[in-house]
Amino acid sequence: MDSVWDRGVFKSIPQAPPTTWTQTHVLLATTDKHKSQVHVQPPITRLVLPGATIVSTSLSTPSHPPTMADAPEDMVESVLPTRWNRDFENIANDLCPQLQRWTRTPQRVIKFDKDESQYFGVRATPAEYPIDKLPSKTWGKGDDFILDFGIHMVGYVSMRLESRGSHMDAPCRLRLTFGESPLDVTLGMENVETWISTSWLPDETINIDTCPEEVSLSRRYSFRFLRVEVIDTSPKYKVTFSDVKCQCVSAISQNHSLEAPQFNDSLLQQIDHVSISTLRDCMQTVFEDGPRRDRRLWSGDLRLQALANYSTFRDFNLVKRCIFQFAAVVREDDSVPACIFEQPQLTPSTDYIVDYDALFAAITYDYVVASGDKAAGHSLWPTVLGCVKRALTHLDATTHAFDESKGEGWKFLDWQPGLEHSAGLHGVLLYCLKAANSLATVLGKEAPFVDLVAQMTEAAKVFLSPDNVFVSGPKAQVSFASASWLILAEAFPQDIARTALLNTLRHPDALKPLTPYLWHHVCDALATVGLYEKCVKIMASYWGGMVRAGADTFWECYNPEDPRASPYGDARNNSFCHAWSCTPTYLLRGKLREFVGVKETKSVTMGHLDEDWIKSQVGSQ
């Protein structure tokens, strides 16, 4: 079966060449999201239209398949027994939302034409017939078409098939491919080279024995485009398709009202909108990291989603549910797992990340302040005290500076290969200790880490070089990660912090972020010290770049120079709706609001925002 189709969309296009592997890769046994260093797939052969010339990649294909290395020592899983808190689990269960449902139908039938000016190398153009003519078309072996729903959705697809001809003497076999991006529906799903499971790939093959038939898929999908391929029928009949629809699901209803600031800059308005759509589609029965992949709750993502939620939907119950789920499954050493599964029953993942553990204190503090729920703060207080314990084992007993070599556990911050974590984790831990102290004040308790905060603030000076650049480790590595977290922890007076941050960002050897997760912290740090113009410039370039590339929701991975970039070896296994990308709305509605300017503020429903987006994407077609 060809990877693309000969009728209606593309002529035969070669498969993508395997990834060129140049660095050591890491595979954890049970982790999907946080698995290895980030590597970039070489450009895949460009799309070929009838009469066009194939443009091949200039990179050679490796002569042998990639191999997987053992995990680095700090990423090896050591699973401690769980100390279950069934009362917390019951609180979380009682807060499980009833998912809201609404129906969307395709807006048009499209094809993709080659266009090198577009980020993905293709441009969507309407088919020769409108969507209301689709039921009159018949389709046989090898035929295909692409439906555009005009907006990213999470939900369940159904359609009606009927046969046309003498008799349906063999089943109709279909392949359905659900596209969050044009890549999904133009590259095919064969020969995918990736070190996470290919069962995440968004396609499904089904057989229909008799028609007419109402086909309903039981699996939830996340998509905007639906590619339908008729793999086979028989010479005696063809099939028709009608009543294609998606029953969308989210914790947020179409009638949910939210504040809609009208920003002076139209690009920032779009960025705000796409941030909200990203967050909404990740809000299911938990705050999922991505509704396509991994479909589960990570604490680092939760912190950013919760902050964006407080500025938009203000669904405090869903945040509370997720916090209590984590608190229900702490380890016997009081540490909090990095990730949890809610189905088929609440279960902690075996993944542990030092910075994610400590961030539980900040997540809880933010929730109590935003919601006013002091009772939850009192209940969670022992977990807040426990979540910083493993991070504290990394402090030098004399200097009180964080040293990543002194304790066990995976330190994340970002996927940048070779990143030195000591300065950045010093900032994370200091930030979280301050959050715990602030929570104590809110709850009327004695702040537990006053002396330690003072000692760590003094110790932070070791991470500032004589020429006012943030450095980390024995080789004085310069990175955006170190700078961002030391700024967010307010380890230095603002004038010193501002100068050092700017010096670090323009340092020629500084390691830059590889994920929106760290780019958020860079922007937040800039806003924290009043460098609003620089913050907005990065936001407009990075998140605005995704908008210009056609994003309905923000992506897990974005490289402006390479649309095939992937943390997993193949972009077809990327998530194009990912939680840790949703934070521009938090900054635009908070720290940046006065700087960027708001013409007016009105209240709108999520349904109204969706309809406006669909019109902007497909117009009157």
Image (cartoon, rainbow, N blue to C red):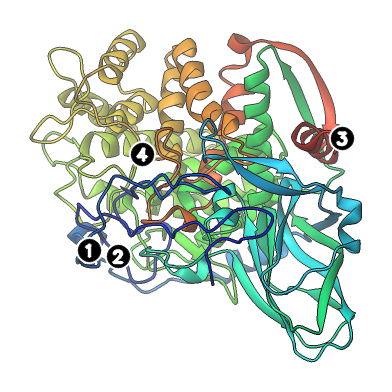
SS state under label 3: loop
Q: Amino acid at mark 4?
A: Leu
SS state under label 2: loop
- Residue at the spot 35% in from the left edge and 48% down from the top edge: 388
Looking at the image, is 269 positioned above or below residue 178?
above
- Residue at the spot 55% in from the left edge and 33% down from the top edge: 118
Q: Amino acid at mark 1?
A: Ala
- CA gap, disc 1 and disc 3: 53 Å
SS state under label 1: loop
- Residue at the spot 44% in from the left edge and 14% down from the top edge: 534
Contact flag, marks 2 and 1 (Cβ < 8 Å): yes
Residue 232 visible in image:
yes
- CA gap, disc 2 and disc 4: 19 Å
Q: Considering depth in this image, is 65 or 282 the residue closer to the camera?
A: 65
The residue that disc 3 covers is 620
Looking at the image, is 368 positioned above or below residue 520?
below
Sequence-wise, the earlier of marks 2 and 3 is 2
